[in-house]
Amino acid sequence: MPEKEYEETEVLKRASEGDRDAFGELYEHYIDRIFNYVYYRTGNTHDAEDLTARVFQRAMNHIHNYTDRGVPFSAWLYRIAHNLVANWHRDRSRKQEIPIHDVPVIKAQGNHPELSLVRSEEQEALLKLIRKLPPERQHLLILKFVENLSNSKIGQIMGRSEGAIKSLYHRTLLSLRDQADDQSLDLEGD
């Protein structure tokens, strides 16, 4: 068994027995990944911070119930995050836009600020399209492109086979392409 897995197994065991320092180690190890996941699903830094805190609060309150079922511990955290984000979206009556102060600043290469503006607009348009996808597909894209996880790991997290993940990924990309094509047609017609 690799050293890292053994250490996490021991930390998980101690955390499930009530060792708060052990839970703190898990928190430190996973906080950035869970925050990124939540941020990409909400598009808002403040809500992402709040929901991330709630993910870890819920995990800490229920760590004694955690059972190793052969999937990574991160899958349990992502499932908690997914459920909280789904509830957050359900509770919100309007779609969220990224506030101007939350839009990532992309530095221009060389002296061509117009390239930076075009890239920023393209990224914003893509994020809007992604946020229109069903939650399961958003979840897949975040795990694939933000977390850089393999199809196998994504399958473990989402409770699906690697083949099912490949198929869902393919259908998701086709759907995004179609939406992007429709959007560009709408823009040309304006």
Image (cartoon, rainbow, N blue to C red):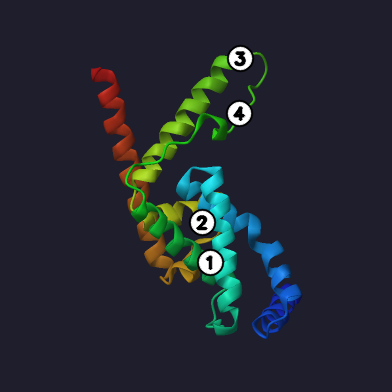
Q: Identify the disc placed on residue 112.
A: 3
How many callouts does the rendering have? 4
Q: At x 37% / y 47%, what residue is drawn?
A: 173
Residue 2 vertical placement versus 188 (above, below): below
SS for tag 3? loop
Counting residues from the start of the chain, the first of labels 2 and 4 encountered is 4
Amino acid of disc 2: Leu
Counting residues from the start of the chain, the first of labels 1 and 3 encountered is 3
SS for tag 4? loop
Instruction: Quote the CA–CA distance across marks 2 and 4.
Output: 22 Å
Residue located beneath label 4 in the image:
106
Amino acid of disc 1: Lys
Residue 70 in picture, x, y percent from top left? 54, 81
Q: Nearer the viewer, mark 3 or mark 4?
A: 4
Q: Identify the disc placed on residue 63.
A: none
Amino acid of disc 3: His
SS for tag 2? helix
Instruction: Quote the CA–CA distance across marks 4 and 1.
Output: 30 Å
Where's the C terminus, which quadrant?
Answer: top left
Instruction: Quote the CA–CA distance across marks 2 and 3.
Output: 32 Å
Residue located beneath label 2 in the image:
143
Q: At x 55% / y 54%, what residue is drawn?
A: 50
Residue 43 vertical placement versus 72 (above, below): above
Task: Tell whether label 1 touches label 4 (CB within 8 Å).
Answer: no
Q: Nearer the viewer, mark 1 or mark 2?
A: 2
Residue located beneath label 1 in the image:
153
Where's the N terminus, which quadrant?
Answer: bottom right
